[in-house]
Image (spheres, rainbow, N blue to C red):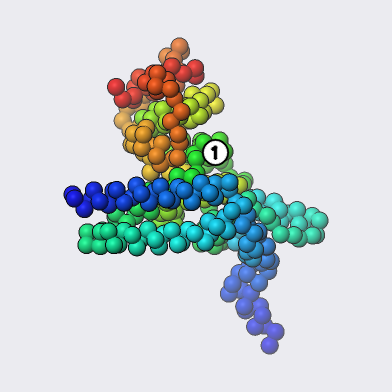
């Protein structure tokens, strides 16, 4: 019965037609992922457009480890098929990204991982994820002292003692 | 209280060992094979250590804190400006002032003209009466310092 195929298609919309992408992480791990999962990434979408224009497909090399990449893929899989305003290239640029409970759970990782994820999300142009990470980092440093902020952000104090005690109003704005 | 002290000492020690392996893989990706393999191991080691040292008083929130505090290889200053601005947009004027004091790099970003909108946005989000625009001879950061700065 040929109809079975079309039933399958309709129960999992788009899945039948989704092609596969080969992503290569910086630690040279090869990860195969469905194209429509990664379509949230503007960077990947542009690559795919390129494939279609030249009708040649190749692996996409990414400058971060598979550890981080898998985390990003997990995020994209969770929001597969969802519309998120921040990721719509045609939408007006949003302000602060909204609080999403799932994201807060998902980003409950050590700060180093968080900073790695935000970098990867920025590279892949996934605005919603950049926004959620930025919110998570902000939550960590909100209301903290300067010294605590240094600790959290991994920033060295490179001021001379005089500079440090001069109020920031010394600036040229 | 006593057990807390032990815990804290232990954390510092772990932090050190962690940042050691972090520094090794800091050259970003080339050595991440190492990172991939050692990360879970490090975590396990940490948990084991915490368990043996504080098995009786070990509470869940403390465990989370331990994960949070590990390693410091990623530097905020190595982030693209877009990311910094995204972060700034989530902070209050008081936070921005503290952040500007963390390092020269962050100060110069926050004090540059490009950041004026960040300060304006932060000011407009302070609950209560909306603060007026700064006087003509005053920059946004100086205005924030005057209004929200800690003495």
Using the image as rendered, state which of residue B19 and residue B143 is in the foreground.
B19
Residue B114 appears in the picture as rendered:
yes
What residue appears at the point 67 percent right and 66 percent down from the top-left corner?
A20
Residue A82 appears in the picture as rendered:
no
The total of numbered circles placed on residues is 1
Q: Is residue B82 above or below residue B67?
A: above
In percent of width and height, residue B9 lies at 29, 48
Using the image as rendered, state which of residue B97 and residue A39 is in the foreground.
B97
Q: Is residue A74 above or below residue A86?
A: below
Q: As drawn, which residue projects farthest toward the left?
A: B1
**Rendered image quadrant of residue A9:** bottom right
Where disc 1 sits, the SS reads helix
What residue appears at the point 49 percent right and 39 percent down from the top-left corner?
B76
What residue appears at the point 54 percent right and 62 percent down from the top-left corner?
A77
Using the image as rendered, state which of residue B150 and residue B78 is in the foreground.
B78
In percent of width and height, residue A1 lies at 68, 88
Q: Is residue A57 above or below residue B134?
A: below
According to the image, label 1 marks what residue?
Answer: B78
What residue appears at the point 68 percent right and 55 percent down from the top-left corner?
A61
Q: Residues within 10 Å of mark 1 (few under 14, many from 20)?
A: few
Q: Is residue B94 above or below residue A165?
A: below
Q: As drawn, which residue projects farthest toward the bottom?
A: A1
In percent of width and height, residue A2 lies at 70, 84
In percent of width and height, residue B140 lies at 44, 21
Q: As drawn, which residue projects farthest toward the top?
A: B137
Query: To which chain does the residue with label 1 belong?
Result: B
């Amino acid at each position: 019965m040929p109809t079975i195929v079309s039933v399958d298609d309709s129960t999992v919309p788009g899945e039948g037609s989704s092609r596969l992408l080969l992503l290569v992480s910086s630690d040279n791990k090869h990860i195969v992922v469905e194209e429509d999962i990664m379509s949230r990434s503007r960077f990947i979408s542009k690559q795919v457009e390129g494939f279609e224009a030249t009708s040649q497909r190749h692996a996409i090399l990414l400058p971060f480890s598979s550890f981080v990449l898998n985390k990003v893929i997990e995020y994209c899989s969770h929001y597969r098929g969802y519309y998120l305003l921040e990721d719509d290239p045609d939408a007006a640029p949003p302000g602060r990204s909204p609080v999403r409970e799932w994201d807060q759970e998902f980003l409950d990782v050590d700060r180093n991982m968080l900073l790695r994820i935000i970098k990867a999300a920025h590279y892949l142009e996934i605005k919603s994820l950049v926004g959620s990470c930025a919110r998570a980092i902000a939550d960590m440093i909100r209301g903290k002292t300067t010294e605590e902020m240094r600790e959290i952000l991994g920033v060295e104090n490179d001021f001379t003692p005089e500079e440090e005690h001069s109020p920031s109003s010394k600036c040229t704005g | 209280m006593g057990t807390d002290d032990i815990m804290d000492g232990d954390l510092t020690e772990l932090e050190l060992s962690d940042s050691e392996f972090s520094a090794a893989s800091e050259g970003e990706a080339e050595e991440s094979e190492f990172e991939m393999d050692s990360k879970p191991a490090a975590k396990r080691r940490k948990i084991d250590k915490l368990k043996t040292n504080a098995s009786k008083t070990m509470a869940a929130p403390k465990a989370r804190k331990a994960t949070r505090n590990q390693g410091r290889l990623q530097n905020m200053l190595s982030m693209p400006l877009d990311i910094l601005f995204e972060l700034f947009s989530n902070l209050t004027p008081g936070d921005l002032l503290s952040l500007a004091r963390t390092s020269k790099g962050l100060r110069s970003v926050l004090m540059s003209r490009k950041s004026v909108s960040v300060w304006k946005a932060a000011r407009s989000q302070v609950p209560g009466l909306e603060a007026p625009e700064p006087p003509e001879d005053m920059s946004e950061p100086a205005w924030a310092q005057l209004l929200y700065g800690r003495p």
